[in-house]
């Protein structure tokens, strides 16, 4: 196993990336980030004096190579992505440029600069839905175009690992939540609605999903960068709790934490035609190989930690 000390991170301005960057800086890693020129770094403004910042579009391969060559990291963590649950026609190039071509650009930079360790970020949306836990070797059936671009990114990792000896890991993340999340996601939407005194519009709330707190996700990345395998290959890991929770339970817990009597409008939103009713990670591989395990239970403390942040920052 090999520990690295310098890391180049993409997507550090985003929800998960900002939490990861904060932990890397806290633990004394030397860090640099790649951000889009138009990207607002509001989540990481307090960290900017302690890191190196490079700006480039993900499709600008040569500029990314220059940045990685200048910083000379021991490893790259790739979190940058474009997410669209239902894409519009004009968004097709954006999704492939960011998620597939972007991954190839970052890996090309790794190849050209001799970086041998790379962590890619994918999604549980790549799996064929069923009532069983999703296993890494399970059948793939992308839920949407975003998931298809992530499958492409995984195959790109396999190619660069086989052809150029880069040690690649891919984390298939299950639904994340926590402080400073994107407002369009379910849990921030619920919290914000209740704080504003509004009734959130929902489906029937019968879905059971495996939500994972952002601190547990960050811990998986930290485990990986402190114990990289020295030999090339491409390993895929599910990063989830293996404990799915029904949406109605999440709603009721948030109501309880906030002490609100506001009732959601169940059934105001129709289920999607391919609605995922059950999402559960099989995380045995990550537990065994990465010595990682999720610690934050969504109903015991995860939602309370999240609600408290929004209560302080949304009012």
Image: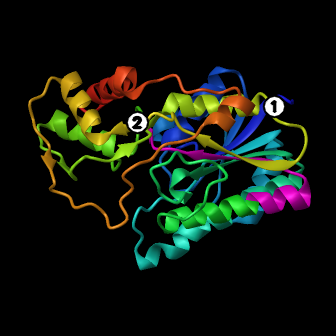
Taking 175 as reference, is 78 left or right? right
315 up-or-down from 96: above or below:
above
Does residue 66 appear anywhere in the picture? yes
- On the image, numbered disc 1 is attached to which residue? 4
Q: Check residue 16 for magenta coloring.
A: no
Q: Quadrant of residue 312?
A: top left
Residue 60 spot, x, y in % from top left: 69, 65
- On the image, numbered disc 2 is attached to which residue? 180
What's the magenta region? 157-177
Q: Quadrant of residue 111?
A: bottom right
Which mark is first along the chain, 1 or 2? 1
Task: Tell me the distance, in whole angstroms, between the alpha carbons under discs 2 and 1.
Answer: 28 Å
Does residue 30 appear anywhere in the picture? no
Taking 267 as reference, is 312 left or right? right
Residue at 40% over, 36% down = 180
Residue 59 spot, x, y in % from top left: 66, 66
Q: What SS does tag 1 mark?
A: loop
Most foreground residue, 40 or 309: 309
Residue at 82% over, 28% down = 3
Taking 77 as reference, is 150 left or right? left
Q: Quadrant of the C terminus?
A: top left
* In contact (CB < 8 Å): disc 2 and disc 1: no
Q: How is the image coloured?
A: rainbow
Residue at 65% over, 49% down = 136
């Amino acid at each position: 196993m090999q520990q690295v000390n310098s890391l180049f991170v993409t997507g550090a301005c985003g929800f998960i990336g900002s939490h990861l960057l904060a932990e890397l800086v806290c633990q004394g890693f030397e860090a640099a980030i790649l951000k889009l020129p138009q990207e607002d770094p509001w989540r990481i403004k307090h960290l900017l004096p302690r890191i190196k910042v490079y700006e480039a579009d993900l499709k600008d391969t040569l500029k990314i190579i220059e940045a990685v060559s200048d910083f000379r990291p021991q490893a790259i963590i790739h979190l940058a992505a474009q997410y669209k649950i239902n894409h519009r026609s004009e968004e097709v190039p954006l999704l492939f440029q960011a998620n597939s071509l972007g991954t190839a650009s970052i890996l090309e930079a790794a190849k050209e600069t001799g970086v041998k360790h790379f962590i890619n970020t994918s999604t549980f949306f790549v799996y064929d839905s069923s009532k069983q836990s999703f296993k890494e070797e399970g059948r793939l059936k992308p839920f949407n175009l975003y998931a298809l671009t992530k499958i492409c990114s995984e195959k790109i990792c396999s190619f660069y690992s086989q052809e150029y000896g880069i040690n690649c890991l891919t984390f298939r993340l299950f639904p994340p939540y926590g402080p400073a999340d994107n407002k369009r996601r379910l849990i921030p939407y619920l919290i914000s609605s209740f704080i504003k005194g509004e009734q959130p519009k929902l489906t029937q709330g019968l879905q059971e999903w495996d939500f994972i707190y952002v601190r547990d996700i960050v811990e998986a990345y930290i485990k990986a960068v402190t114990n990289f395998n020295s030999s090339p290959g491409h390993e895929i890991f599910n990063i989830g709790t293996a404990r799915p929770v029904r949406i109605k339970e999440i709603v009721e817990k948030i109501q309880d934490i906030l002490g609100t009597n506001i009732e959601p409008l169940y059934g105001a939103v129709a289920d999607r035609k391919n609605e995922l009713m059950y999402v559960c990670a099989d995380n045995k591989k990550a537990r065994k190989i990465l010595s990682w395990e999720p610690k934050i239970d969504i109903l015991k403390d995860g939602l309370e930690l999240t609600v408290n942040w929004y209560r302080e920052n949304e009012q």
